[in-house]
Amino acid sequence: MNSQHELSVAERLSAIDAAIADAARQAGRDAGDITRIVVTKFHPASLVQELYDLGVRDVGENRQQELSAKVDALRQAPAPGTEGLRWHFIGQAQTNKAAQIRRAAQAVHSIDRARIADAFDRAAADDGPLDVLLQVNLTDDPGRGGVAPKELEMLAEHVLALPTLRLRGLMAVAPLGEEPAAAFARVHDYASRLRAIAPDADWISAGMTGDFVEAIAAGATHLRIGTAITGPRPAQG
Ligand SMILES: *Cc1c(COP(=O)(O)O)cnc(C)c1O
């Protein structure tokens, strides 16, 4: 047995929420304007249930199969189950998986090309509009995912014309090897460009375990926090 006290999920969650409140105060912002999404990838559905029971209502997943499996597993749970839980898809999406993602998630953060936006629009069933965010690439490497900043407006116009998608804002991942504050300053700028053509698209999804304080300072409205709350991820399956 390790003599050190191992923190529980509940303890880590409240510590992170306190840190978020602190960072918001430092930035002169209302913590109530910030949504903390707990990224549960690689963890079992039982952890999502545990988080829900602790009051978490927003969770994030980055792979379609895992997302669908957890959503299905939790739908079996007895009442109150996970009523009101919102699933955010934060990984790279493939067009042939769009229908399954749309069936499982309430928001998709990773729209980075017209073709994937079209696929999500075509996948609409009787559900309401799907909340989507445009992922912006903060690196010079096109392989990293995300639309190149110079193509942001073009993609936004494309998405705005799709009837079953509701454009909510921007998502970005701070690149390795750059100060997150500098990267998020660019995101702040792209967000104003987006709002110039889509005034309601005011979500900024940015900030993870290592950089959520900087993201809050730069105006992030949605944080995607995994390991700081869930503990280390089990080995990737
Ligand atoms: C895994 C992941 C996160 C969470 O990362 P942590 O460092 O564990 O907080 C956030 N955003 C995306 C896109 C991810 O894939």
Image: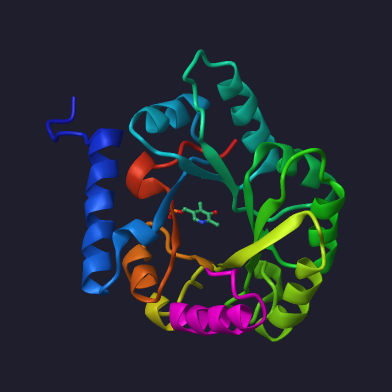
200 in the magenta segment = yes
Comparing 203 with 174, the one in front is: 203
Tell me the magenta residue range.
183-202
> Could you tell me which quadrant the N terminus lies in?
top left
- In the image, what residue occupies the spot 51% across and 13% down? 78
The picture places residue 203, in percent across and down from the top left corner, at 52, 65
Magenta region, mostly helix, strand or loop? helix
The picture places residue 113, in percent across and down from the top left corner, at 78, 68
Comparing 28 with 223, the one in front is: 28
Instruction: Give residue 170's quadrant in the image.
Output: bottom right
Asked if residue 231 shows in the view, the reply is no
- In the image, what residue occupies the spot 70% across and 51% down? 130
The picture places residue 27, in percent across and down from the top left corner, at 27, 74
Give the side of residue 143 with respect to residue 99, left or right: left
> Could you tell me which quadrant the C terminus lies in?
top right
- In the image, what residue occupies the spot 22% across and 53% down? 18
65 in the magenta segment = no
Give the side of residue 185 with respect to residue 63, left or right: left
Give the side of residue 37 with respect to residue 124, left or right: left
Comparing 4 with 38, the one in front is: 38
- In the image, what residue occupies the spot 25% across and 66% down? 23
Asked if residue 216 shows in the view, the reply is yes
For the image, the number of numbered tags is 0
The picture places residue 181, in percent across and down from the top left corner, at 38, 79
Give the side of residue 12 with respect to residue 237, left or right: left
Task: Kindly give the residue lying farthest to the top in the view shown.
Answer: 78
Comparing 93 with 201, the one in front is: 201
Whether 163 is drawn above or below 52: the answer is below
